[in-house]
Amino acid sequence: MSLSFASGFDETESPGWGAPPQEEEDVVTAAIKKEKVVKEIVAQQEDLRALLSRVMEVQTDVDKLVSGNETLQMYIDNLTMQMAKRR
């Protein structure tokens, strides 16, 4: 009676402890590439958030300056009318 360890085992189905089949390598490589792309997208989103924050700060400053300029223009107009009345 002879016992065989390989009875019912087809080596083409599972290579055992060897290198993973090409398909698995492709899946792993694709997953790594996707993870890298996702990290790049997240980093770019953070950069865009920082830029948006800066734009909002600058817009606030611009609004304050516009308001100040309008006030100064009204002051200049009033002074000009007062000077014209004195003549």
Image (cartoon, rainbow, N blue to C red):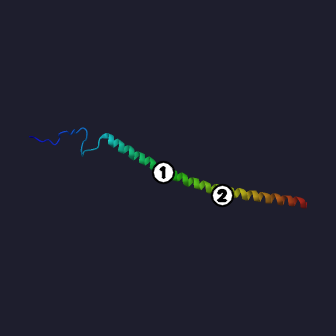
Query: Which sits in the foreground, 86 or 78?
Result: 78
Q: Quadrant of residue 66?
A: bottom right
Considering the numbered disc 2 on the image, is that residue within a helix, a strand or a loop? helix
Query: Which sits in the foreground, 79 or 47?
Result: 47
Q: Are marks 1 and 2 in contact (CB under 8 Å)?
A: no
Residue wearing tag 2: 61
Give how far across and how far down residue 18 sits, in percent.
25, 45
Give how far across and how far down residue 24 sits, in percent.
32, 42
- Disc nearer the start of the sequence (1/2): 1
Q: Quadrant of the N terminus?
A: top left
Q: Amino acid at mark 2?
A: Asp
Q: Residue at x 16, y 43 (%)?
A: 5
Q: Residue at x 33, y 40 (%)?
A: 23
Q: Residue at x 50, y 50 (%)?
A: 44
Tell which tag, 1 or 2, sits nearer the viewer. Answer: 1
Considering the numbered disc 1 on the image, is that residue within a helix, a strand or a loop? helix
Q: Amino acid at mark 1?
A: Val
Residue wearing tag 1: 42
Q: Badge 2, how many Cα within 10 Å: few under 14, some, many 20+?
A: few
Q: Badge 1, how many Cα within 10 Å: few under 14, some, many 20+?
A: few
In the image, residue 75 sits, relative to residue 30, either above or below, namely: below
Q: Quadrant of residue 26?
A: top left
Task: From the viewer's perspective, tell me whether residue 45 is left or right of residue 30.
Answer: right
CA separation in Å, label 1 and label 2: 29 Å
Give how far across and how far down residue 80 sits, in percent.
84, 58
Give how far across and how far down residue 77 sits, in percent.
82, 57
Q: Residue furthest left?
A: 1
